[in-house]
Image (spheres, helix red, strand yellow):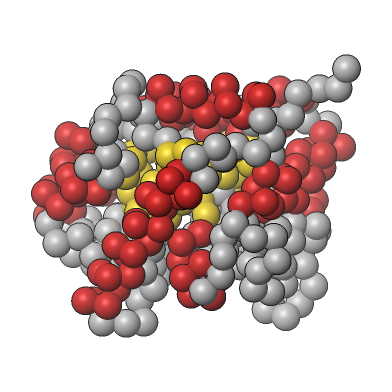
Amino acid sequence: MGSPRPFIVDSHQDIAWHVHKYRRDFSLTETAEKAMITLPALFTGGVVLSCVTLFAEHNAPRSVRRKRLLRELEFYLELPEKFPQHVMQVASVDELRDLRERAASSAEVWGFLLAMEGADLLESPDELQVFHEKGLRMLSLTWNERNQWATGAKHHGGLTRKGALLLHKMRELGIVLDVSHLNEESFFDALGQWSGPVCATHSNPAALCEDTRNLTDEQLQSMQERGAVVGTLLYNGFLDSSWQSGGPQTPMSRVAEHVEYLLGHLGSESVGIGSDFDGGLTAKNTPEGLDTIADLPKLGAELKRRGSTNEIVAGVLGENWFRFFERHLPPRASPRL
């Protein structure tokens, strides 16, 4: 009798952004050349739960970007209606456990949890209530830029007064704080005022690849003290600082080195995968062997080859994120308004 399929969780996927940018059908295997995530590929790879983003790229007027953000929200909310036997939204512990039960009996079940990548399009902290009622359960304050709430990785500055109010509203609603994309000053400002659940959905250790998007050892220590989970980002440029666009893919072993470094600093229950697939990533700028979302199990095989136990590998592939959300999602489902 074979071992059970792993429960794979990916904490950062930009599905709606990519689907709309390339005008492709998420349900089809044959899609735009650059697509890394389709519904069939998720099934093939055994990815049972994805944290999917609301993200409107910053190359358009604010009014246009707001429309794109709301269109992305509508796209996600329609998926369970289009594929009722295969897709479900997860916004509570009840739904999380239901997803696990359904996945145990079918290889073609996938759930998504809504996250917002960058809060600059929110008009006020109170508007967060509207998105929470639709199932939003995780929020990052910024993308790479400085906005009304805080400062992203490519700029200088910290949390603003408005940002403190937004954190208060997030805590009131029970929304998880994602620190990926914050610069160091905003990171420590935010954690200084935050008592709720925190994670980094897609970040790597700066000690192995020096970049403002990666986390220093001091930041990792703060995350470890709070029981956070960090999702390993599968972009060559954040895995190897010497990599250049157009160069060869980084080897799978490089991903494993980042995972192992995080395990050493955070512990065996605090490391996961946050691929960032379809967020501008393609097979040309992701590690060797990780060409689509269906390839994620290969990372587990590489970790085992390097000596990780089955328990540690299962944790990295998904169990750690499952436990994190089991602790921090609201216990029961409520109607989506």
Does residue 126 appear in the picture of this structure? yes
Q: Residue at x 78, y 30 (%)?
A: 308
User: Which residue is most to the top?
Assistant: 1
In the picture, the quarter occupied by the C terminus is top left
Does residue 243 appear in the picture of this structure? no
Q: Residue 267 versus residue 107: which sits nearer the camera?
A: 107
Q: Residue 28 versus residue 59: which sits nearer the camera?
A: 28
Q: Is residue 296 left or right of residue 324?
A: right
Q: Is residue 175 left or right of residue 271?
A: left
Q: Is residue 79 left or right of residue 59?
A: right
In the picture, the quarter occupied by the N terminus is top right
The percent coordinates of residue 277 (x first, y second) are: 59, 59
Q: Is residue 289 left or right of residue 193?
A: right
Dividing the picture into quarters, in which one does residue 328 lie?
Answer: top left
Q: Residue at x 48, y 49 (%)?
A: 82
Q: Residue at x 37, y 49 (%)?
A: 77
Q: Residue 24 versus residue 200: which sits nearer the camera?
A: 24
The percent coordinates of residue 17 (x first, y second) are: 45, 66
